Image (cartoon, grey):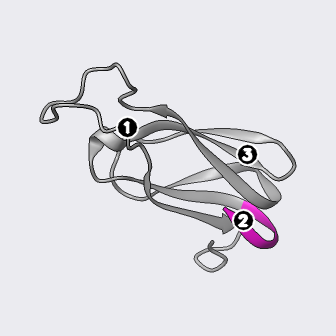
């Protein structure tokens, strides 16, 4: 996600997709200074807010889905015949440090 200008982000809101088979257990955030933060995601379909610690001054955040809940080769959950390989998010938002609810990207 590219920001219009360098922004001091302090948190991220993340919502898993509705289908559990498409959920992820961890993502890696990479910031414009090259630093990274691994976020362990709650296994819940509601929007959950995670801290960016320490807050980051950045012009972009690259999001990598590092750990799908059901990786290729695993057994699909009950009710599914096959894995979709469609891991992703329904919603992702970043918030400026100390600003809520305004200052959302």
**Residue 13 part of the magenta segment:** no
Q: Is residue 10 left or right of residue 39?
A: right
| Boundaries of the magenta span | 1-9
Kindly identify which residue carries mark 2.
2
Q: Which residue lies furthest to the bottom in this view?
A: 102
Q: Earlier in the sequence, mark 3 or mark 2?
A: 2
Question: Quarter of the image holding residue 43?
Answer: top left
Residue at the spot x=68%, y=73% of the render?
A: 99
Helix, strand or loop at label 3? It is: strand
| Badge number at residue 85 | 1
Q: Which of marks 1 and 2 is nearer the N terminus?
A: 2
Q: Which residue lies furthest to the right in this view?
A: 33
Q: Is residue 86 left or right of residue 59?
A: left
Residue 20, horizontal then vertical, whole percent = 28, 42
Helix, strand or loop at label 2? It is: strand
Residue 40, horizontal then vertical, whole percent = 53, 37
Quadrant location of the N terminus in the rendered image: bottom right
Residue at the spot x=35%, y=29% of the render?
A: 70
Q: How many marks?
A: 3
Residue 48, horizontal then vertical, whole percent = 46, 55
| Badge number at residue 30 | 3
- Kindly report which numbered mark, 1 or 2, lies closer to the viewer in this rendering: 1
């Amino acid at each position: 996600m590219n920001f219009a200008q360098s922004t001091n982000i302090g948190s991220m809101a993340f919502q898993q997709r509705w289908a559990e088979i498409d959920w992820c257990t961890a993502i890696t955030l990479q910031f414009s200074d090259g630093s990274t933060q691994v976020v362990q995601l709650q296994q819940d379909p509601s929007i959950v807010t995670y801290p960016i610690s320490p807050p980051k001054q950045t012009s972009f955040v690259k999001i990598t889905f590092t750990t799908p809940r059901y990786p290729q080769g695993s057994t699909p959950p009950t009710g599914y015949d096959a894995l979709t390989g469609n891991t992703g998010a329904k919603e992702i938002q970043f918030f400026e440090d100390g600003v809520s609810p305004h200052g959302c990207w």
